[in-house]
Image (cartoon, rainbow, N blue to C red):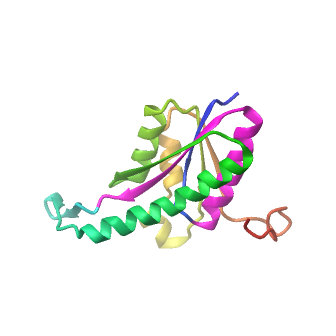
Amino acid sequence: MFKHILMPTDGSEHSERAVERGIELAKLCGAKVTGIHVMQDFRMMIGPEGLVPTELDASMEERERERAASFLAFVQKTADAAGVPCATMIATGTHPYDAIVDAANERGCDLIVMTARHRKGLVSLIMGSEASRVLHRSSIPVLCFRALMSADHPDKGRQPA
C-alpha cells in the first residue's frame, strides 16, 4: 500500500502520538519512514518591504538545530524499536507547510502522517493550521491525527513511552 511515509514533528506530545501511529502503519505496510522537523528561517523576517535579512545569532541557530535533533531522535528511536527503516531530516523555511510538501515530493513519499491541532478563536485566524495547509498543497494523501481526544479514546489515559 504505502512505501515511504513522511512524518513531520514539532516535538509536542500530540506530534509524538502521530509519529507512533505512523510508525505502526509503516510496519503494517512494510514502508520506510522519514522524520522531518522544519526550523524557522530566522535569517529572513517580514518587514515593511517584505522579506528582509536579519542578524542571526549563530548560537541561536545551533540551539534550534539541537532542539530539532532531539525531536527527530524520538522518531528514530520509535522506528528502530518497531524495526522500521527510518531517516531523519531538518529543513529550514519561512513556511513549514511548504518545506513539508517539498520534502515529500523530493523524497518520493506516498503518504504524510502528522498531527492536526485544534485552535480556537483569534489564534485560529492568525496561526491557522499547518496540517490544513499541507492538506491543501499536497498531491499525496495526508493522514492527520487529531490532537484532541474524546474521554473514551483508548490512548486518553496512556502514558508516553
Horizontal side, residue 60 vs residue 22: left or right? left
Residue drawn where x is 66% and y is 30% of the image? 2
Inspect this view and state whether residue 117 appears. Answer: yes
Question: Which residue ends up furthest to the left in the rendered image?
Answer: 49
Residue 108 magenta: no
- On-image quarter of the N terminus: top right
Residue drawn where x is 43% and y is 32% of the image? 106
Residue 113, percent from left and from top? 61, 46
Most foreground residue, 103 or 34: 34
Q: How many labels does the image show?
A: 0
Above or below, 98 relative to 43:
above
Quadrant of residue 141 within the rendered picture: top right
Residue 55, percent from left and from top? 17, 68
Most foreground residue, 128 or 14: 14
| Magenta-colored span | 12-41
Above or below, 78 relative to 157:
above
Horizontal side, residue 25 vs residue 113: left or right? right
Residue drawn where x is 46% and y is 45% of the image? 100
